[in-house]
């Protein structure tokens, strides 16, 4: 498969790290210990000094805090917070114990900083070697102003990509690694490990896979419902959206714009607002039940158990999801439908195909071909569909009081409940990882085989 | 004979058309009905969350007035200003990130390009707020979870991941002929000049689309805001405020105000959405064209 294929280096350069170490002159070799030395020797003074400053800053950082953070990482702290009787104030005061969560956070951050440092070190080495080679060949060595200028042209990506990548690193990657680490600790309210916790290896995974325990059985039932939900939510939307857009786009339909507007109006209302409205309308005393009572369809004191009966609740969230999602699907599919070449239809008509044949032989294959990536994205989006479930049913009804999840809880909403409400951070992290694994397998199997991925960027 | 055939075909078509229009009308009613209902509720004079009549008995503007005057429990005007402030700044930052990343990935060829795109796909598979708690701890560690700094924290959080959602804008940039770039290069433009003077002006639809979507994000999200604001009620955004109005302790008094608030924030967003609907379709079909 594509993943295993050996990558051909598209960007060959003679200035690599290995060659710098093997073939570099003494000043380049000295740059391994004293970053930027080679640059300074060859006249790139500011650049060299900057590299040197980076190295100095890293060393100072490591001495001041970094080394301590790394050293604490294996044990995650041992000093517990203690109550001490303060004679002079006549109160209990608390000694400052170790906070494992901060130790872990700073530890992970230090590892990331070290990784960046290694990158900088390699960069310095390459740059020193390049300067040396250029000087040897008698070519021009860029000075600092010229280097800055390349940022606007040859190296524009460095200028443009650095800020976004920095923030992705700080607010997406660092937290993610941090959470993944948490999955291997006992950071949880269980046994009050909220201040001090330890590495426990794969214990959390074992606990979750053990189907005899409450946690394990909850996990399997939530996982099952998540997959069922994602399947139905994706395809009900897709099929229904396709039917509606076919109805609107067929030749005989009048006032196409008006019908489209009616549907699009509901997706112009912010999703959380429409979901909250739906939820209040479907309560036992909500508008729908009142309407049904006034119409005499159900008894005066009766109400349909939209969110109180497990099966009703599950069907309700799927149906409401159709209400929420179809306008988006409609917008998406309308564009695709209009792109189907008209000659195909004309040719089919000449050959005497009926409407059903045209649909199954032309429209559907074309739609599936174009929208497969969209379907995959929607599927993964539905597995992670927090908003619909959390705002509509909140995971209710909870039938088994000993379990932590309700009947409509998805893995993500369960994750939310476990971490925010119950503070079982470690189990929450494990669920996050497992969700990722499920999605990654599904996505890798399908996504990399789609045409639009393979042909990416082929202009 | 032939005339009869045509006539029966005509009748068949008429019946088909009528059926389709009836179905569409029913569906349209189902889709528009909750929206009409909430608009009506926002003008309802009777207080209370659950009433025994479906339609309001009498109408009033008090709900809207109260939303802006009764600031003792839920300070709606302040929430509005908070959200506006956050939205403006996070919009500026994320627009820059999205456009910069999309341009680089679409037009420039560099070593980390493919790895970056693969990484963004992998990161997209993690549940979005799995790392939410961790983000909170990080913000707390750098001291951004107190007072007005919460606004800065929210701006950073909303714009932080923007560099990962480049697909639509990149799809659009891909459709601009590369010959334009090459001509400019021959004329001695730097790539920076091509980006600012050629690509961006040619991509107005997608720039507008990016600005509007990133401006709307803070109005719509409430999970991150809730976790980061915690009990700092003076920093709440609109979404948390509306959510709170439906909580048990407030719902009886605030239900009609919730409807009013929902209508108020829906109007601008609906206007923006209808305005940029065509960009939405263009952007998406550009992205899946393959």
Image: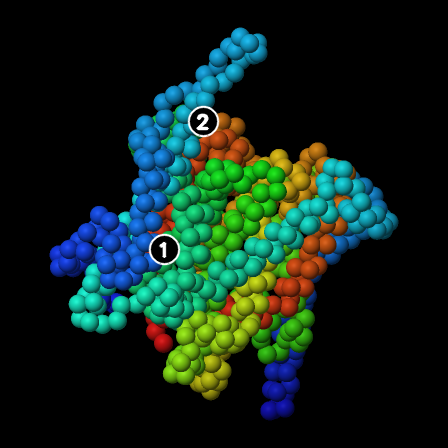
Q: Which mark is residue B119?
A: 1
Q: Residues within 10 Å of mark 2 (few under 14, many from 20)?
A: some
Relative placement, left or right, of B248 versus A164 is: right
Relative placement, left or right, of A81 versus A272 is: left
Tell me where residue B239 appears, x and y as whole percent.
64, 47
Disc 2 is placed on an element classified as loop
Quadrant containing the C terminus of chain A is bottom left
Q: Is A211 located above or below residue B56 in the figure? A: above
Tell me where residue B130 appears, x and y as whole percent.
45, 43
Quadrant containing the N terminus of chain A is bottom left
Q: Where is mark 2, residue-wise?
A: A194
Task: Name the quadrant containing residue A107.
Answer: top left
Residue furthest toward the left? Answer: A22
Residue ID at (80%, 45%): B69
The residues tagged by marks 2 and 1 sit, at their Cα atoms, a distance apart of 32 Å
Tell me where residue B173 appears, x and y as whole percent.
45, 72
Relative placement, left or right, of A294 versus A168 is: right
Q: Is residue A107 visible?
A: yes
The subunit letter for the residue under badge 2 reads A
Residue ID at (22%, 52%): A31
């Amino acid at each position: 498969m594509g993943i295993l294929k050996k990558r051909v280096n598209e960007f060959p350069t003679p200035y690599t790290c290995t060659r710098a170490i093997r073939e570099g002159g003494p000043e380049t070799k000295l740059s391994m210990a004293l970053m930027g030395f080679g640059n300074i020797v060859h006249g790139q003074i500011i650049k060299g000094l900057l590299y040197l400053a980076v190295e100095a800053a890293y060393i100072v950082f490591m001495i001041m805090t970094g080394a301590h953070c790394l050293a604490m990482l294996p044990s995650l702290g041992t000093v517990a917070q203690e109550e001490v009787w303060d004679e002079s104030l006549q109160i209990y005061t608390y000694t400052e114990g170790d906070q494992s969560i901060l130790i872990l956070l700073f530890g992970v951050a230090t590892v990331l900083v070290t990784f960046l440092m290694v990158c900088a070190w390699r960069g310095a080495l390459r740059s020193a070697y390049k300067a040396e080679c250029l000087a040897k060949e008698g070519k021009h060595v860029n000075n600092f102003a010229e280097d800055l200028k390349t940022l606007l042209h040859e190296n524009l990506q460095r200028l443009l990509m650095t800020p976004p990548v920095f923030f992705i690193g700080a607010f997406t990657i660092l937290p993610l690694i941090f959470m993944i680490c948490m999955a291997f600790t006992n950071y949880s309210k269980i046994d009050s490990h909220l201040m001090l916790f330890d590495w426990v290896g794969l214990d959390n995974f074992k606990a979750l896979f053990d189907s005899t325990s409450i946690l394990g059985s909850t996990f399997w039932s939530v996982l099952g419902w998540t997959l069922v939900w994602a399947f139905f939510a994706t395809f009900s939307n897709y099929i229904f959206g396709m039917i509606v857009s076919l109805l609107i786009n067929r030749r005989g339909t009048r006032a196409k714009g008006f019908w489209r507007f009616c549907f699009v109006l509901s997706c112009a209302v912010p999703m959380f607002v429409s979901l909250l409205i739906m939820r209040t309308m479907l309560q036992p005393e909500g508008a729908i039940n009142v309407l049904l009572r006034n119409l005499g369809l159900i008894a005066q004191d009766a109400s349909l158990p939209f969110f109180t009966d497990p099966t009703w609740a599950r069907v309700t969230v799927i149906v409401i999801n159709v209400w929420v999602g179809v306008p988006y699907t409609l917008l998406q599919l309308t564009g695709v439908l209009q792109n189907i070449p008209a000659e195909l239809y004309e040719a089919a008509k000449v050959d005497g195909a009926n409407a059903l044949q045209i649909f199954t032989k032309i429209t559907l294959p074309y739609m599936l071909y174009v929208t497969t990536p969209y379907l995959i994205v929607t599927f993964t989006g539905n597995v992670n569909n927090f908003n619909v479930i959390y705002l509509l049913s909140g995971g209710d009804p909870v039938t088994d009081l000993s379990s932590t999840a309700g009947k409509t809880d998805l893995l993500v909403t369960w994750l939310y409940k476990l971490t925010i409400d119950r503070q079982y951070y470690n189990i929450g992290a494990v669920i996050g990882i497992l969700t990722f694994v499920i999605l990654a397998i599904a996505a890798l199997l399908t996504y990399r085989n789609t045409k639009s991925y393979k042909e990416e960027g082929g202009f | 004979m032939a005339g009869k055939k045509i006539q029966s075909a005509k009748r068949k078509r008429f019946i088909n058309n009528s059926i389709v229009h009836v179905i569409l009308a029913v569906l349209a009613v189902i889709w528009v009905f909750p929206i009409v209902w909430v608009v009506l509720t926002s003008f309802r004079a009777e207080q209370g969350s659950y009433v025994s009549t479906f339609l309001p008995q009498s109408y009033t503007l008090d709900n809207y007035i109260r939303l802006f005057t009764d600031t003792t429990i839920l300070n709606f005007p302040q929430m509005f200003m908070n959200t506006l402030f956050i939205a403006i700044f996070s919009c500026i930052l994320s627009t820059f990130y999205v456009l910069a990343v999309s341009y680089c990935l679409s037009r420039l060829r560099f070593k980390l390009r493919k790895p970056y795109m693969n990484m963004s796909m992998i990161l997209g598979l993690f549940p979005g707020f799995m790392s939410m708690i961790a983000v909170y701890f990080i913000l707390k560690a750098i001291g951004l979870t107190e007072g007005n700094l919460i606004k800065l924290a929210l701006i950073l959080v909303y714009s932080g991941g923007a560099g990962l959602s480049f697909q639509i804008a990149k799809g659009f940039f891909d459709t601009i002929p590369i010959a334009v770039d090459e001509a400019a290069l021959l004329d001695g433009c730097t790539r920076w000049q091509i980006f600012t003077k050629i690509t961006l002006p040619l991509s107005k639809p997608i720039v507008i689309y990016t600005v509007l979507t990133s401006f709307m994000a803070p109005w719509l999200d409430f999970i991150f805001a809730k976790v980061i604001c915690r009990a700092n009620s003076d920093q709440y955004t609109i979404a948390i405020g509306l959510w709170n109005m439906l909580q048990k302790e407030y719902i009886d008094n605030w239900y009609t105000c919730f409807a009013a608030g929902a209508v108020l924030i829906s109007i601008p967003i609906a206007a923006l959405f209808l305005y940029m609907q065509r960009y939405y379709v263009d952007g998406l079909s550009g992205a899946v064209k393959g």
